[in-house]
Image: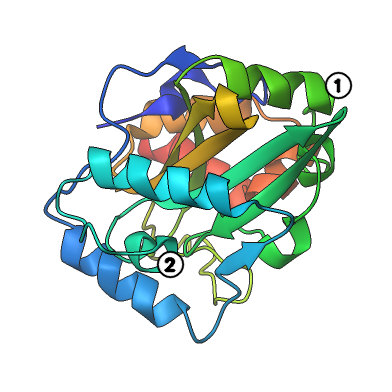
Amino acid sequence: MYHPYKQGYHTRPALEKLEEEPFHKDADYDNFIKEKHKALPRQEVELKHDCDPEIISTVESFIQSKADWVDPNSDISSIALQIQEDIAIHRTKDGKDWLAYTNISFPSSWRPEEKIGKSLVEIHSPVPGMNLSNSYKMAEACTQKGPFRRFVWTPVFDNKINLHPGMPKKKFDPENPFIKVKVERQITWPFPELNCFLFILRQYIVDPDIKDLYEACSAMNEEQRKYKGVEQNLIDAMKEMN
């Protein structure tokens, strides 16, 4: 299981070479698929902005080749409902980059409809301390190199995998301390011949090591704590738990 909070909190890309398969089916499969179907009527899940049919077709074939449980006759909309991961496609062309396609059921406190068509810099502008000075250069690198993976994490106080901002979100209750960490594994898979990359997002809810989580949260600055929903009562409670 992944525990990236043990390395502290940071916003640098911290890309690693991907060693495992990009898609996998585990014991939580049925729950993930159920939650994806529940998200469809209440969220903007599938969105497109200047995404060529050839790109969509190539991504469909790629996922079918990597996830052998997917119906080979499925289109991308149906494929996305047969995998636990969320997917997005980011394009580069003529010195510009943009988010061209999303099928995101479990966004981590962001709205896909506000990000579609935007560059990497624009997409990540709300993240404190993230410096993407050359969006096109980074996006172009992702289309040519990889696959890579990285992790982001957030303390959470229930077992929900869907942190869409339109969904109710529990705050930390010091009287009934329930602490988990939502880990998002992010994979970039390059398609250099099409000048795009596939972004693959997988959510995990893990039981944290409280000492390591306390140290990571304590080291955040005020802006980072606000962004991640880390309040002083959580830090105080974790200190007492150590």
Q: Residue furthest bottom?
A: 41
Q: Position of residue 85 (x, y in %)?
A: 37, 50
Q: What is the three-letter code of the residue carrying label 2?
A: Ser
Asked whether residue 15 appears in the rendered view, the answer is yes
Q: What is the three-letter code of the residue carrying label 1?
A: Asn
Q: Quadrant of the C terminus?
A: top left
Q: Residue drawn 78% across and 53% down?
A: 117
Q: Is residue 143 left or right of residue 179?
A: right
Q: Residue drawn 39% across and 45% down?
A: 202
Q: Residue drawn 81% across and 48% down?
A: 118
According to the image, label 1 marks what residue? 134
Q: Position of residue 98 (x, y in %)?
A: 76, 43
Quadrant of residue 160 within the rendered picture: bottom left
Q: Residue drawn 45% across and 64% down?
A: 162
Q: Residue furthest front?
A: 54
* In this view, 99 is above or below 43: above
* In this view, 57 is above or below 131: below
According to the image, label 2 marks what residue? 77
Neighbour class for label 1 at 10 Å: few (<14), some, many (≥20)? few
Neighbour class for label 2 at 10 Å: few (<14), some, many (≥20)? few
Local secondary structure at mark 1: loop
